[in-house]
Amino acid sequence: MEKKHNSLSGGHLKKELGLFSGVSLVAGMTIGSGIYYLGSYVLERTNMSMGMALICWLVGGLVSILGGLCFAELGAEMPVTGGLTTYLSKAYHPMLGFINGFSGFLLTCSGSIAALALAAVTPFAEEFGLSEWGVKGVAIAIIVLFTLLNLRGVKIAAVFQNFTMVARVVPLVLIILIGILFGKESPDLNPGTAFAGANPSIVNVIKLIGYATFASLWAYEGWTNLNTVAGEMKKPKRDIPLAIIISMGAITLIYTLFNLSIYRVIPAGEVNSMVSSGNLYLGTETAYRVMGNFGKWIVLIGMTIGIIGTVNGDCLVFPRTYYAMARGGYFFKTLGDINDKGVPAKAILASSAMSIVLVLFNSLQTLTDWLITVSALINLLAIIAVLIFRKKFPEMERPYKVWGGVPVIVLTILCFVILLVNNFVSDPITSLKGLIIIAVCVPIYFIFRKLNGGVEYDTDKIDN
């Protein structure tokens, strides 16, 4: 009989993953829905300056690569499944680990499922005359569908996930090719247009780039996942940083070319009108203008399959965190149960229920803004943890250390601090909402601790 609860620790993992596997993992977890609609938000934040928008996509990629290199050290020195929850607990305090996991349930993880489901439906709203609540209804149906799929077992969900991997790349490549090869527009790529001809100060330039770059970060989320397989890398010292640089470098190039190809096809004035009217999916319009309805529907179908594939993956992965927390005594105990299919059914249902609540009460843009704020803050704490671990656990084996040493780590920390502070200044209400979510987790931590008999939050217990 199979064990229903296997160890989650990385103590006996086989080192079978090479460089290509690492690249595939990062790329597969990063490319989702964000690139298809976030380009509109980046343009809005750069005052519709195409040149400045492209710069912000490049900056977002660079910041993500730097963050990934720091995460690579954490993954190589502590190759366990538990990720951010484990790192934050051991570097700071167990409460921060709990906050990461529970805020994931309240917002970041559940919100990701909700945002992806909405993103899969929104491009079809105009085609089928869907109202706002019509879009929400279909998004909820998508979540329910993949909840039922995952309740039937891991194997079925994994088969579908493999199929969607190819589909998510096709529309990106198609739009880039048709835009670069057949586009006839000559977009104004002068970044100075972001300031309406004025001579801005360095501070204002940094503020604008920071604010717009922040909008791109959700499209780059995914580089935090390579650490989960660090214990299975054949040559982690070499392959982890290389996998991050190669995959994130390629994704940065693809994302930048994707937006450039749009500018090559759609005149600037029409781009402005589309974005202002809420028509965020500029890529599908690009395909339509070059290839007609055939191109438009190829992109729509490929994009949607890729997005719902990520919904499926999220429905598969995120509930395991809540299951592990429940087994560790710091979540509702019933979520630690396994059904006869060998999956944490109650955790899956709880995750989906929270996602549906977020769909009902939030828009796609609101969810995206919240997710970026909370995720960036948690990622910043994890990057700082690299320095804390070096001081706190000097004898810990480190098969890989951040290239460039402490200066690169400090530079990465400064980049995230600038982005976060600038976003708080530029959009304080949304940022404060994200902080409220984190603050709500604090008393809940002590409630679970009391229910657990006062025993401290034990990451080793959760991992096992």
Image (cartoon, rainbow, N blue to C red):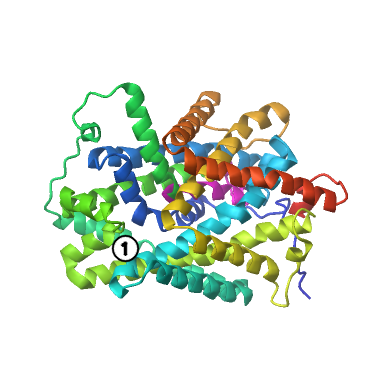
What's drawn in magenta, residue-wise? 219-238
Residue 99, horizontal then vertical, whole percent: 67, 46
Q: Is residue 182 left or right of residue 97?
A: left
Q: Quadrant of the C terminus?
A: bottom right
Count of numbered circles in the view:
1
Residue placed under numbered mark 1 in the picture: 171
Q: Quadrant of the N terminus?
A: bottom right
Identified by mark 1, the residue type is Pro
Secondary structure under tag 1 reads helix
- Can you see residue 166? no
Which one is in front, 261 or 144?
Answer: 144
Q: Is residue 373 left or right of residue 86?
A: left
- Please tell me which residue is depicted at 25% across the width and 35% down the height of the picture: 194
Secondary structure mainly formed by the magenta segment:
helix
Residue 344, horizontal then vertical, whole percent: 69, 68
Q: Residues within 10 Å of mark 1 (few under 14, many from 20)?
A: many
Which one is in front, 431 or 4?
Answer: 431
Q: Is residue 223 magenta?
A: yes
Figure check: 385 above or below 134:
above
Residue 296, horizontal then vertical, whole percent: 25, 68
Q: Is residue 81 left or right of residue 41?
A: right
Residue 308, horizontal then vertical, whole percent: 45, 67
Q: Is residue 385 left or right of residue 172?
A: right
- Please tell me which residue is depicted at 73% across the width and 37% down the height of the picture: 93
